[in-house]
Image (cartoon, helix red, strand yellow):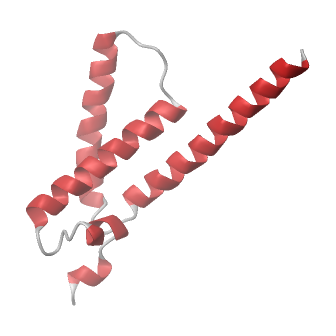
């Protein structure tokens, strides 16, 4: 059985099967960056700096586990979809507030 056939899109894109050292780091950075985007768009509030550091530390630790799952499961792809949905939501919310302010 060839493992390369079962890799997720981003794992195959980064050639995790051929060059696991660089591929895993690229996959980790992609998952971490997408997780930060999803967090900022969907859940982030203004926090003191120490609380933000703690949140991002745990986010980085969680992304380590997600990276290992992301080799064969579509973790990064799911984060891309979540980010797109949240971006669309934020744009629509901005347009709605802008139109509401225009009517007042």
Q: Residue at x 43, y 38 (%)?
A: 37
Image position of 44 (left or right of 8): right
The N terminus lies in quadrant: bottom left
Residue 52 pos. (x, y %): 33, 19
Between 96 and 73, the residue placed more toward the observer is 96
Q: Residue at x 30, y 51 (%)?
A: 30
Residue 3 pos. (x, y %): 22, 81
Q: Is residue 2 above or below residue 77?
A: below
Q: Residue at x 38, y 56 (%)?
A: 76
Q: Residue at x 25, y 48 (%)?
A: 29
Quadrant of res 35: top left
Q: Is residue 6 above or below residue 61?
A: below
Q: Residue furthest bottom?
A: 1
Image position of 84 (left or right of 54): right
Quadrant of res 97: top right
Between 96 and 8, the residue placed more toward the observer is 96
Q: Is residue 22 above or below residue 4?
A: above
């Amino acid at each position: 059985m060839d493992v390369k056939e079962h890799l997720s899109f981003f794992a195959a894109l980064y050639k995790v099967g051929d060059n696991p050292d660089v591929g895993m780091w690229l996959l980790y950075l992609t998952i971490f960056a997408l997780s930060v985007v999803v967090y900022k768009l969907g859940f982030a509030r203004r926090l003191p700096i120490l609380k933000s550091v703690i949140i991002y530390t745990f986010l980085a630790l969680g992304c380590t586990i997600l990276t290992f799952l992301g080799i064969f499961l579509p973790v990064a792809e799911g984060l891309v979809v979540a980010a797109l949905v949240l971006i669309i939501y934020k744009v629509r919310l901005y347009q709605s507030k802008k139109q509401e302010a225009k009517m007042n």
